[in-house]
Image (spheres, rainbow, N blue to C red):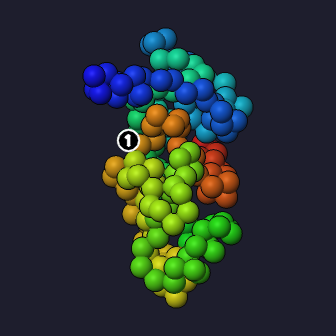
Amino acid sequence: MSSHVHMAYFNSTIALANPLVHSHTTTNQQSFALSFISSKDLPGTNEAIPAELIIGWTPVQDRVDPKTFIENHKFVNFLTSVLRENIHKIDDSNLKALADWQKEGWLHINDERNPPAWGRISFPEDIIGSVELSAGKIKEGTYQAMPAHRIVSNKGLFQLSEPLMNYIVHAAKQKVQQ
């Protein structure tokens, strides 16, 4: 009986509420590609979105379901690379305040779709990654992705803080222009 409840819990679809995410038809007409890139961001009308900029695929245009969403590992690698190279210099006041408060050790970067209660640690699927701290500052190049993080969970598509999300979107748009 409890497995029945568990199945129903993960079978719900979640509306895409993020205005930064765009849905694109694919060549097989059976799925939609989700990306931070809109068709207006592409340099030409017949341009394809680079594979590493597709977050994943869903069979329903404006909804995600953890059971049917296909995560794109190339996007996860892009996200990891951008954060590893830049997180120490992104102006995220909340992240800087947490680093200053903690001072040393490893600080988790939480997915904001399911924030933990104050003083608690997020579930592994809701930790994007971690950074090493020294003297209250993020050490350059120390970002490590959390292997258990899910781009889509029963709480929806991943969400970063506004400064981190804006940086990822900016990096994706820069990649298209290269």
Residue 69 appears left or right of 89: left
User: Is residue 29 depicted above or below 45 in this figure?
Assistant: above
Q: Count residues near mark 1 (Cα–Cα under 10 Å), then give few for <14, some for 14-19, many for 20+.
A: some
Seen as rendered, the residue at the extreme top is: 29
Instruction: Give residue 129's position: percent from left, percent from top.
Output: 43, 59
Q: Quadrant of the N terminus?
A: top left
User: Is residue 36 depicted above or below 164 in this figure?
Assistant: above
Q: Look at the numbered disc 1 and give the secondary structure of its residue.
A: helix
Whether residue 12 is visible to the viewer of this picture, yes or no, is yes
All told, the count of numbered labels is 1
Q: Quadrant of residue 90?
A: bottom right
Instruction: Give residue 124's position: percent from left, percent from top.
Output: 38, 53
User: Is residue 120 depicted above or below 67 in this figure?
Assistant: below
Seen as rendered, the residue at the extreme bottom is: 135
Residue nearest the observer in this picture, 80 or 125 = 125
Type of amino acid at the residue the image marks with label 1: His
Residue nearest the observer in this picture, 161 or 124 = 124
Seen as rendered, the residue at the extreme front is: 1
Residue nearest the observer in this picture, 99 or 141 = 99
The residue under the point 47% across, 23% down is 12
Whether residue 42 is visible to the viewer of this picture, yes or no, is no
The residue under the point 57% across, 19% down is 61
Instruction: Give residue 79's position: percent from left, percent from top.
Output: 49, 51
Instruction: Give residue 63's position: percent from left, percent from top.
Output: 56, 23
The residue under the point 34% across, 28% down is 6
The residue under the point 66% across, 24% down is 45
Mark 1, residue position: 73
Residue 73 appears left or right of 116: left
